[in-house]
Amino acid sequence: MEKKFIVRPKSADKKDDTSVTMTIRINKELQKEYDKLAEKSHRSRNELISMALCYALENLEFIPEEENQ
């Protein structure tokens, strides 16, 4: 079964005091898609990317290389 990354419109303004600043490079088309979703959801692009990163970590399956290859 395919898991969906669900985003709902933001309802309450909550501040997160545990955040850090990071710089990443992404494809321009990906930025445009996040901009569209940010407008639709009333969430910041940063908030959406952070949500997506958390989702990726929670659903990640890491397969280490076999030692005897």
Image (tube, rainbow, N blue to C red):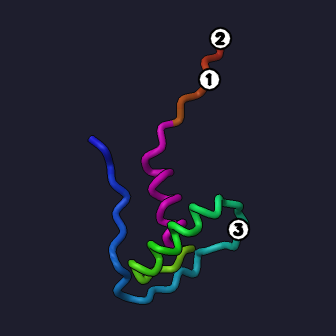
Residue 67, placed above or below residue 11:
above
Magenta region, residue range: 47-61
The circle drawn on residue 22 is 3
Is residue 25 found left or right of 43 in the rendered image? right
Q: Is 59 within the magenta?
A: yes
Spot the residue most to the bottom: 13
- Residue at left offset 53%, top offset 66%: 50
- Of the 4 image quadrants, the one containing the N terminus is top left
- Asked if disc 1 and disc 2 are in contact, CB closer than 8 Å, the reply is yes
- Of the 4 image quadrants, the one containing the C terminus is top right
- Residue at left offset 51%, top offset 85%: 15
- Asked if disc 3 and disc 2 are in contact, CB closer than 8 Å, the reply is no
- Residue at left offset 64%, top offset 10%: 68
Disc nearer the start of the sequence (3/2): 3
Q: CA distance from mark 3 to mark 2?
A: 36 Å
Describe the element under mark 3 as helix, strand or loop: loop
